[in-house]
Amino acid sequence: MSLKIATFAQRPDLHQAIWSDEFRQNWAAFVDGGVITDLYYDSFFLPKEKIPFLEYGLVAFDSSAPDQPLARGFCVPFAFGGHRQELPDSGWDGVVRWADWDWKSGTTPNALSAIEINVLPNQQGRGLSSLMLQAMRDHAKRLGFQDLYAPVRPTHKHLEPHTPMLEYAFRIREDGLPFDPWLRVHARAGASIVKVAPNSMTMSGTLEQWREWTGLPFDQSGEVVVPQALVPVLCSVQHNVAAYVEPNVWMHHRM
């Protein structure tokens, strides 16, 4: 395979394929309950000249089949420093809000945040996620950024929904690398853990929506363990609502 990586701006012809259901399979259905996810992803369906972060999206494809994307990646630029002295506890949601505000206010960004790397299910296990991460690092340097951050979603945390993220994130193996595979990929690429983002992604919906998203009854108040969720979902039968507040791990790649 001869892998090529381009920006969304360079390959506008792949726009439809980038949003195929194949990529959607890697996300749990309850992601539809995220308001901030809509703020970001819906922007790619504006007229081309109004899409704010087109230059910060990456798509990978094989040179022998250039019309079939194999992986996609998203970043957002944001201003860090000044009144923003710490990365937001709200992680993914927070940095997307920052980027949106900076774009609309004309604030010059000085950092980049990765917010997604997504590899087609039939292409996983071939090292494409690592290659996409390196491509993000290279692209950040090409754009003049010295810092790439990422509110990382640990891939195996869903197997331990009751383990505090602060305990899970800093668990290491005998070789000194993080226990979690995705944290380990970032660490091998040169990143270090900054802190836990306790409320990185918030998704809420009615109990009927949660039943549709998960196939679970959601008929009792309290914690509900949901497949693919990193922590339990909080359910209130009385108020007909359930909310999922996902913690992530802020990691920093210094160029």
Image (cartoon, rainbow, N blue to C red):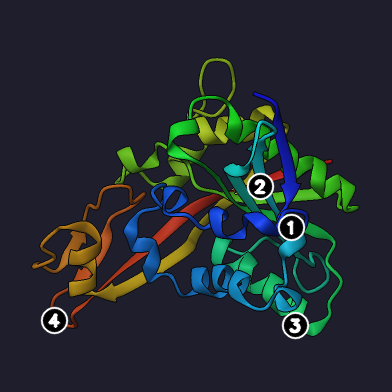
Dot 4 falls on a residue whose secondary structure is: loop
Q: Please name the amino acid that badge 4 sits on.
A: Gln
* Image location (x, y in percent) of residue 131: 67, 32
Q: Considering only vertical position in the picture, is 49 above or below 118?
A: below
The residue that mark 3 highlights is: 104
Q: Residue at x 9, y 67 (%)?
A: 220
Earlier residue among tags 4 and 1: 1
Q: Considering only vertical position in the picture, is 22 above or below 189?
A: below
Dot 3 falls on a residue whose secondary structure is: helix
Earlier residue among tags 3 and 4: 3
Q: Nearer the viewer, mark 2 or mark 1?
A: 2
Query: Considering the image in quadrants, where does the N terminus appear?
Result: top right
Earlier residue among tags 3 and 1: 1
Instruction: Give the left or right position of residue 68, taking residue 120 as reference.
Output: right
The residue that mark 2 highlights is: 59
The residue that mark 4 highlights is: 238
